[in-house]
Image: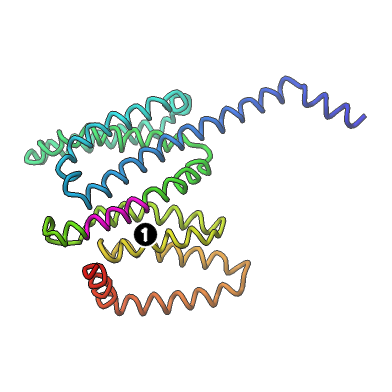
Amino acid sequence: GHLREVAHLARSPMISRNVLIDSNGRRCDKIIGLAVSLQIMIMAVKNILVSGNTFLSSINNVLNTILFFVVGAIYLWGFRCVSRRMKGLSIIILMASAILFCISALLFNENMPFVKELLPRTIVYSFIGFLYISSINDFEYLLDYMAKFSYVIICASVVSACMLMRSVGSGYLDSQYSMPLSYFTLIGVMFLLNKYTREEMKMDLLVIAAGILVIIAFGSRRYLLPIFSYIFVALVRRIRSDAMTIKWVWLLLVIGLLVALNLDYVTNRLNDVFAGQ
């Protein structure tokens, strides 16, 4: 009798409808998450490679135009799902941001040429991107896609670092310092750190280490702060369930302090090694 009751509930129209709605909701979260993560990955890889290659840097405007339409097409693909989930608060925030953007342009007329150039990309990448992210109900799909694309981002940063060294060695560039390279590499490192805290795959640690090495050797060291902050918070959260983690917290604090006190020496030695190659 119990089995017949369960079978009857499974055939119930109300339950079938709820299952269908839940399935459609997950599908929309996947589509929106994929659209947003693709945009982040495409623009990150483009900016990383442009930072290390003089030819790509010379055609950066062309690449920006092409990728503008590519990202626009991706967002159009996912717009059907977003249109069903638009929230009033998100629309109000976008309108307020647009008003502030216009006021800033009117108050500082000297910036008008730059505003006109950046306006289309700001609308697509920032405003529409925010609208899509605010429409996500389950961020697990977005995190999963970003973790997968982070491998591509960090691989691109390693390739760009090699090209950057060759360009400097050949005299095409005067300096190995590249803030865009370190900034976009940080995106991949942070999402892989989040993945490692959940799955603890050793391969992720190797990729994370490669990304951190690129940031230290070629970019701004200030981007190391969010990395070590995330590691510290993740370890503190694990203390409640694993007392042995306390030892790792203290070990990382000591290592971080030593690195901070000798950061210039470490970066100079790394630069000497790469320059020698």
Say which residue label 1 marks: 211
- Name the residue furthest left: 110
Q: Residue at x 39, y 74 (%)?
A: 256
Q: Quadrant of the C terminus?
A: bottom left
Residue 225 at x, y = what percent? 35, 64
- Looking at this view, is 184 or 222 the one in front? 184
Q: Residue at x 53, y 40 (%)?
A: 138
> What residue sits 66% from the left and 27% below the top?
18
Figure coloring: rainbow
Q: Which residues are magenta?
A: 154-165
39 vs 129, nearest the viewer: 39
Q: Position of residue 84 (x, y in %)?
A: 48, 24
- Residue 41: give x, y in percent of width and height: 36, 43
Q: Residue at x 12, y 36 (%)?
A: 106
The number of discs equals 1
Position of residue 233 relative to residue 4, above or below, is below
Q: Please, what secondary structure does the residue beneath circle 1 have?
A: helix
Q: Quadrant of residue 216?
A: bottom left
Predominant SS of the magenta segment? helix
What amino acid is at disc 1? Answer: Gly
Q: Quadrant of the N terminus?
A: top right
- Picture quarter containing residue 185? bottom left
Asked if residue 262 lies left or right of residue 171, the reply is right
Q: Nearer the viewer, residue 44 or 101?
A: 44
Query: Residue 103 at what x, y percent from top left?
Result: 17, 36
| Label 1 CA crowd tier, 10 Å (few <14, some 14–19, many 20+) | many
Tell me if residue 275 comes above or below residue 117 in the rendering.
Answer: below
Residue 121, above or below 55: above
The one of 173 and 91 positioned closer to us in this rendering: 173
Q: Is residue 159 above or below residue 1?
A: below
- The verdict on residue 88 being magenta is no
